[in-house]
Image: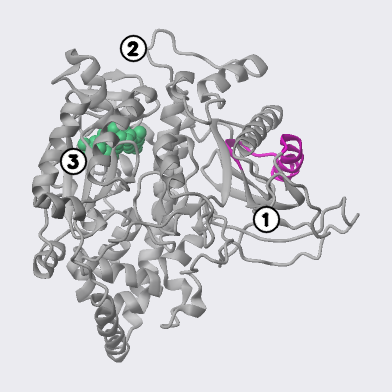
């Protein structure tokens, strides 16, 4: 097991040593990699880009948070700590009472999935370092390439620098979906209600099958892996078996590739295992949390989370501290999530950053059209429209408006979306998304006139409220029995940045309703973070229980918006992340964004889903060429794949600087 990222050093002659990005994180198969070399190459090759600037900004914020946390920590008196220790002791008793060792969960994850599929169809790739993707970004690399530090989400041009012999194979989503379906056919035999994560992973509750067949979890895992191998004609996977999903996921990574690890269902085995586990191994603990915990509180292992529980409860919100404590105790979800109903529908597009307003409006029109199409297909009508923008410098903005009536018409959507966009211009944008929520549950597609006041919601603020009242608001400071200052929490810290998290909410009456009354501006806190609070328990759910499943299985994840199901589980890959982990969620959502980009790079053939009308980024870029400035196309690309220009990811900071003017 790797130790995760080392703490930042600040040696000015070796600046790359403190440059930790997702590209420098170890994945399975990267144990012997020369990390410093990888860091240096990544640093040198991304230096000066917007991505780099954004990383630097994030790094600076993280350092501030660490300092802030240290200060707070230093101010805690021993009597504070002993009081918090009492809270910890009480919480331990409470959560221990919920420990469920009666279930057997299996997490299965395909090995180097896309790369393995490609090797299956072209055996000459076997044993050679290869990556799936193009020069802008790669989706994954086989284990041979990983030895050079090449990994998923890394731009291909950096990967090639690390491994000059690297072979690139373009992404072929339909192929991966096909193989994913084959694996799921196998999973169904062991748990018909398995939870599908991304295309290559799933959680299975194998309690019943173990009991019925008198087999152990390990035996079932062996059998399942061998069935996957034969059903797919040669793909391997790895599995983890444990008492809950959190542990099972950690376990499936231990003996990758083509291996498995079984953690016995008894408390002392679980505690021994978890106590020495590096915190970064836990799904949900990303770079920021890891650094704060390590650098400010010297918490390196999950066991430390229990040992230093008083600090955690003193310095974090209760929900964060509860999460840490439960991780430290090896607790995790053991239930099969209930069926959820859709609370919103959205469509978004990523493209090479542009400030060309004509182009932006035309993209907006396409997205409105796609969204309307999807809504009509699902017979949905809604009245809250949210516009999401990602600027060239990776700032996320969300703006929302509540319409007078429920609608699914592209004209309505576009009319209001245009107003929202107009208010933001000029700005250089790399992503536009539109989301419709607040469905008319009773009479879909009916058109009831609503109240007169139309809210215009613009986010930006330092505290938040869930859109959905039924969602538990973990961030609600008033519920925090410790009365923690939100300043201290991870969740608050993220509000300090205007990038990806700052939200403002004001309301005004729509002109057409109450002319010239643009105001009554009133602050309202609404959480419109991507996907948050978009799903909730649907008490009188009419959909049958297969509804969500079907969605999870049949819809390509890269086409779906990221939604935190039940407020904590990513609908795209199953990772569980509490709402207060705002930065980790952002990191995670960026990961899926990267996936989506890569998929779009693979061209129109990749869309065989209900959203198949959506055009690939390459297509859109092609159209842009016709409509606007011509873009240079690299002739005779070595890898032969279509790719989004590198500046989609790496726009040099000295370019487009005028485009970035942000309207305040
Ligand atoms: N993927 C992607 N972009 C990423 C990460 C992954 O498109 N940033 C895709 C390609 C992977 C697939 O998702 O093949 C599964 O992701 P995993 O993290 O499971 O990675 P692999 O299956 O490739 O490797 P392994 O699970 O063996 O580590
Ligand atoms: Mg995998």
> Which region is colored magenta?
409-434
Residue 457 in the image: x percent, y percent? 69, 56
**Mark-to-mark CA distance, 2 and 3:** 28 Å
> Disc 2 marks which residue?
638
Quadrant housing residue 255? top left
Of the pair 472 and 178, the residue shown nearer to us: 178
Q: Is residue 151 visible?
A: no
Element on which disc 2 rests = loop
Q: Is residue 268 left or right of residue 634?
A: left
**Disc number for residue 407:** none
Q: Is residue 443 left or right of residue 608?
A: right
**Mark-to-mark CA distance, 1 and 3:** 42 Å
**Disc number for residue 28:** 3
Circle 2 residues within 10 Å: few <14, some 14–19, many ≥20: few
Would you say the beta carbon of the disc 3 residue lies within 8 angstroms of ligand 1? yes
Residue 297 in the image: x percent, y percent? 27, 70
Residue 438 in the image: x percent, y percent? 64, 54
Q: Is residue 70 visible?
A: yes
Element on which disc 3 rests = loop
> Disc 1 marks which residue?
458
Q: Is residue 504 left or right of residue 146?
A: right
Of the pair 652 and 2, the residue shown nearer to us: 2
Residue 138 in the image: x percent, y percent? 34, 29
**Mark-to-mark CA distance, 1 and 2:** 46 Å
2 vs 3, front mark: 3
Would you say the beta carbon of the disc 1 residue lies within 8 angstroms of ligand 1? no
Q: Which residue is at a point 81% across and 65% down the rendered structure image?
A: 520
Asked if the magenta segment contains residue 154, the reply would be no
Asked if the magenta segment contains residue 417, the reply would be yes
Quadrant housing residue 480? bottom left
Q: Is residue 660 above or below residue 500?
A: above
Q: Quadrant of ligand 1?
A: top left
């Amino acid at each position: 097991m790797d130790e995760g990222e080392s703490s930042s050093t600040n040696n000015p002659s070796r600046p790359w040593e403190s440059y930790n990005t997702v590209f420098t994180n170890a994945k399975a198969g990267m144990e012997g990699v020369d990390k410093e070399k990888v860091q240096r190459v990544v640093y040198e090759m991304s230096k000066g880009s917007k991505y780099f600037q954004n990383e630097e900004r994030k790094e600076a914020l993280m350092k501030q948070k660490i300092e802030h946390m240290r200060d707070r920590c230093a101010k805690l008196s021993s009597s504070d700590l002993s009081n918090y220790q009492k809270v910890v002791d009480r919480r331990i008793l409470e959560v221990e009472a919920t420990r469920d060792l009666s279930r057997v969960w299996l997490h299965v994850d395909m090995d180097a999935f896309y790369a393995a599929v490609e090797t299956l169809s072209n055996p000459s790739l076997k044993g050679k370092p290869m990556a799936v993707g193009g020069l802008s970004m790669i989706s994954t690399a086989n284990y041979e390439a990983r030895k050079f530090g090449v990994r998923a989400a890394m731009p291909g041009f950096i990967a090639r620098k690390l491994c000059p012999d690297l072979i690139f194979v373009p992404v072929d989503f339909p192929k991966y979906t096909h193989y994913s379906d084959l694996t799921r056919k196998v999973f169904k035999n062991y748990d018909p209600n398995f939870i599908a994560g991304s295309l290559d992973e799933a959680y299975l509750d194998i309690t019943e099958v173990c009991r019925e067949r008198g087999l152990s979890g390990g035996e079932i895992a062996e059998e399942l892996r061998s069935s996957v191998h034969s059903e797919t004609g040669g793909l391997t996977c790895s599995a983890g078996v444990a008492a809950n999903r959190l542990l099972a996921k950690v376990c499936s990574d231990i003996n990758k590739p083509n291996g498995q690890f079984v953690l016995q269902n008894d408390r002392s085995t679980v505690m021994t295992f978890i106590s020495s586990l590096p915190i970064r191994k836990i799904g949900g603990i990303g770079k920021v949390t890891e650094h704060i915990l390590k650098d400010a509180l010297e918490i390196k292992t999950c066991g430390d989370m229990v040992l230093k529980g008083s600090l955690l409860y003193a310095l974090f919100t209760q929900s964060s501290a509860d999460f840490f404590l439960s991780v430290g105790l090896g607790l995790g979800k053991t239930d099969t999530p209930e069926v959820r109903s859709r609370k919103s529908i959205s469509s978004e597009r990523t493209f090479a950053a542009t400030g060309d307003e004509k182009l932006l409006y035309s993209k907006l029109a396409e997205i409105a059209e796609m969204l309307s199409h999807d809504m009509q297909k699902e017979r949905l009508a809604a009245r809250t429209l949210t516009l999401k923008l990602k600027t060239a410098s990776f700032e996320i903005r969300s703006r929302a408006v509540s319409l007078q009536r429920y609608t699914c018409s592209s004209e309505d959507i576009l009319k209001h979306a245009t107003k929202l966009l107009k208010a933001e211009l000029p700005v250089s944008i790399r992503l536009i998304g539109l989301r419709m929520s607040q469905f008319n549950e009773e009479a879909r597609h009916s058109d009831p006139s609503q109240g007169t006041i139309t809210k215009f919601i613009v986010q930006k603020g330092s505290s938040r409220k869930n859109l959905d009242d039924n969602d538990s608001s973990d961030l609600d400071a008033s519920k925090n029995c410790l009365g923690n200052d939100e300043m201290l929490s991870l969740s608050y810290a993220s509000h300090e940045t205007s990038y990806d998290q700052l939200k403002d909410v004001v309301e005004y009456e729509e002109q057409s309703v109450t002319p010239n009354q643009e105001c009554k501006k009133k602050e309202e806190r609404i959480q419109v973070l991507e996907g948050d609070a978009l799903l909730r328990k649907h008490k009188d759910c009419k959909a049958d229980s297969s509804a969500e499943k079907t969605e999870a299985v049949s819809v390509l994840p890269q086409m779906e918006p990221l939604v935190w199901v039940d407020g904590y589980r990513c609908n795209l890959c199953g990772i569980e992340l509490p709402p207060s982990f705002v930065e980790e969620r952002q990191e995670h959502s960026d990961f899926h964004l990267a996936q989506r980009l890569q998929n779009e790079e693979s061209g129109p053939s990749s869309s065989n889903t209900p959203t198949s009308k959506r055009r690939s980024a390459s297509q859109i870029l092609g159209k842009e060429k016709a409509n606007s400035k011509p873009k240079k196309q690299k002739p005779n690309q070595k890898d032969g794949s279509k790719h989004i220009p590198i500046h989609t990811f790496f726009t040099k900071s000295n370019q487009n600087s005028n485009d970035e003017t942000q309207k305040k």
